[in-house]
Amino acid sequence: MSLMASHTDGSRSATAVRSASSKALAHVPPPAASHAREAEPLPPSCAREQLLLAVGIISAPQFHGRRSLLRHSWLLSPNVVPRSTAPVCAMFVIRSGGMRGSEGALLRREAHAYKDVFLLPAVAYNETRLRGPLLSLVEWLRFAAEHLSHATFIAKVDDDTWLHTADLARLLAHTSAQFPPPAPLYLGVHTYSHWV
């Protein structure tokens, strides 16, 4: 599992990024002008001022089943949007660049029906298994830094991750009280690996 929830202060390590740290993305070049996109509207409760955590769930276009399982499991938790006072907002982050035909139509219908999908036309839908999730993460963090800066924490999880949102919200609230903004904070696990 990779959950990013951050205040980064070098000595701590975990994964949730405090959203005020949009400067962390300054070194990432903006998408090419041909891929510039209008921001999709946020789910109404994600736009609230008092949002503790905004979660980007990285998913590939073909994983409809995984998204359905999450929508029928932890995304039904009482503290997850769309409830009007929920402290947690979750959105699926799906690469969709160049997608046409029935697959594209199916993905657009899913986005319209559930209103919890953030489509990424700047990332090719058929991007490799290694590059696709990484490019999706970069786009999610860009979007979150710009449009979800009112969230105390920004997080990233994969679509095969189960979150116990009540415990996570308590942990983040406690951690935020111990290290109040604008102190940088990172919660999660860093793993360093490479392929030979």
Image (spheres, helix red, strand yellow):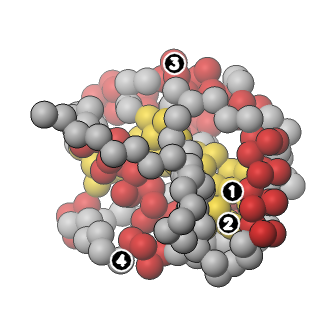
Query: Which label belongs to residue 26?
Result: 4
Q: Could you tell me how far apart the alpha carbons at marks 2 and 4 are, in whole angstroms?
A: 19 Å
How many residues crowd around disc 1 within 10 Å: few (fewer than 14), some, or many (20 or more)? Answer: many
Per the image, the residue denoted by label 2 is: 151
Q: Secondary structure at mark 2?
A: strand
Kindly indicate whether the residue at mark 1 contacts the one at mark 4 (C-beta within 8 angstroms): no
Residue placed most toward the observer, 91 or 163 = 163
Q: Is residue 27 left or right of residue 77?
A: left
Q: Quadrant of residue 141?
A: bottom left
- Dot placed on the residue nearer the N-terminal end, 3 or 2: 3
Question: Residue flagged by tag 3: what amino acid is it?
Answer: Gly
Residue placed most toward the observer, 125 or 196 = 196
Q: Secondary structure at mark 1?
A: strand
- Dot placed on the residue nearer the N-terminal end, 3 or 4: 4
Q: Position of residue 21 (x, y in %)?
A: 52, 75
Question: Residue flagged by tag 2: what amino acid is it?
Answer: Ala
Per the image, the residue denoted by label 3 is: 65
Residue placed most toward the observer, 91 or 13 = 13
How many residues crowd around disc 3 within 10 Å: few (fewer than 14), some, or many (20 or more)? Answer: few
Q: Could you tell me how far apart the alpha carbons at marks 4 and 1 are, in whole angstroms?
A: 22 Å
